[in-house]
Amino acid sequence: MQLSTTYLTDYCKIYVADPEYTQADALAAYCRVHRTEIMQQLHQHGILLFRGFKIERSYEFYELIEQHLQLEPRNSITPNTQGWFATLMRKHSEKLFGINNEKLYHNHNIVQLKPRENAIQNLHIQGSMHSTRSRYVALFCQRTSTHLAETGFNDLEKIWNHFPTSIQKKYLGAWSHFSYISIRKLNILDRLLLKNSPFHLSKLTNKRAKLTLKRSPFVITHPDTQRLAIQPWVFANNTHTFAHHTTQTICKHRGSLQSGFAANHMQLSWELFTHTGEKIEWTHQEKQQYFDALYRDALLVQWQQGDIALVDNIKIAHWRINDWKENHHLLQIQANVFNANQHAAL
């Protein structure tokens, strides 16, 4: 079986089903036979979108990723737990930070993403707050929306290349430093959940806690393309207003759009340091220029029923806009461990 191909942009290649072979087992067979080629194309482009297949169930999605593409699904927050328990623990831990993501785990590695409603989710790669992150992300549109429900994608290698030389010099070798302030006093369950987490915990005078992560590379060298790629995470209090200003400008035809709930309610700070530990000044003007560059020329994918997208998580950033809770089901699997420290661009 051969699939016809087309492009949404140079970093998003679409594989279209043969009308005579649209069942899940047809795509599974194709992925088994062409796995090496598929992974090469994924690293070259950044996004591969399989369209026109009749895939309906979450287990079909999971089997495609784990068995036929031989990726390694992972859940860094609540690993090796049943879906209902992972959902419960995630809700509890996120309330400590003031987040209300309403993510639903179908099993320990498949998560149904929260709708954005009349809002834009801030652009990010999965896990970029921490040096250990997911190498790949897979997305499955199990049910489409009657309203616009899109995911934005941005090529981080292109974004780096478009930065002025002066900005590249400033960011090259920089390390991101993230820290949270809890919105309440920690209880026993909080401490148990944080015991094996990557956070360093320190108490504040108001009995709340400061949770700090080790620094992670702001720019990496992609292991396959050998190109430099920025590694963004823009949910912080001191950055999300600049991101929202940019998205409101580029999506002005959508009317007034709210900024993401998480960014508004988390007490999260994002700072930049040199590799020797010196703090880098990051002005408001530089932050606005940075986010203008991040969101510019974004690809907005309008999902179709049964779509499955493979995303190179260290090359492509993503963000969601305008989907609605009652009808749009977008499922996500993160896969394969990637240690950004080993690929830091210095």
Image (cartoon, rainbow, N blue to C red):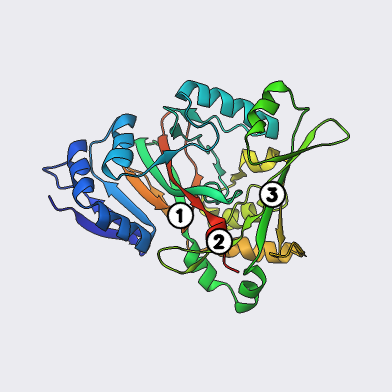
Q: Residue type at mark 1: give it.
A: Phe
Q: In the orientation shown, which residue stands out farthest toward the right?
A: 205
Q: Residue type at mark 3: give it.
A: Phe
Residue 8 sits above or below residue 165 on the image: above
Q: Residue placed at 45% from the left, 32% from the top?
A: 112
Q: Secondary structure at mark 3?
A: strand
The residue to which callout 3 is attached is 178
Q: CA distance from mark 1 to mark 3?
A: 23 Å
Look at the image and tell me in which quarter the C terminus lies.
bottom right
Q: Residue placed at 67% from the left, 54% from the top?
A: 215
Q: Secondary structure at mark 1?
A: strand
The residue to which callout 2 is attached is 294
Q: Residues within 10 Å of mark 3 (few under 14, many from 20)?
A: many
Q: Which of labels 2 and 3 is toward the front?
A: 3
The residue to which callout 1 is attached is 153
Q: Residues within 10 Å of mark 2 (few under 14, many from 20)?
A: many
Q: Residue placed at 45% from the left, 29% from the top?
A: 108
Q: Residue type at mark 2: give it.
A: Leu
Front residue (pair 145, 203): 203
Residue 172: give x, y in percent of width and height: 62, 69
**Of callouts 1 and 3, the N-terminal one:** 1
Marks 1 and 3: CB-CB under 8 Å? no
Residue 228 sits above or below residue 109 on the image: below
Residue 224: give x, y in percent of width and height: 40, 64
Front residue (pair 50, 203): 203
Place residue 42 in its image quadrant: bottom left
Q: CA distance from mark 2 to mark 1?
A: 10 Å
Q: From this viewpoint, is residue 227 visible?
A: yes
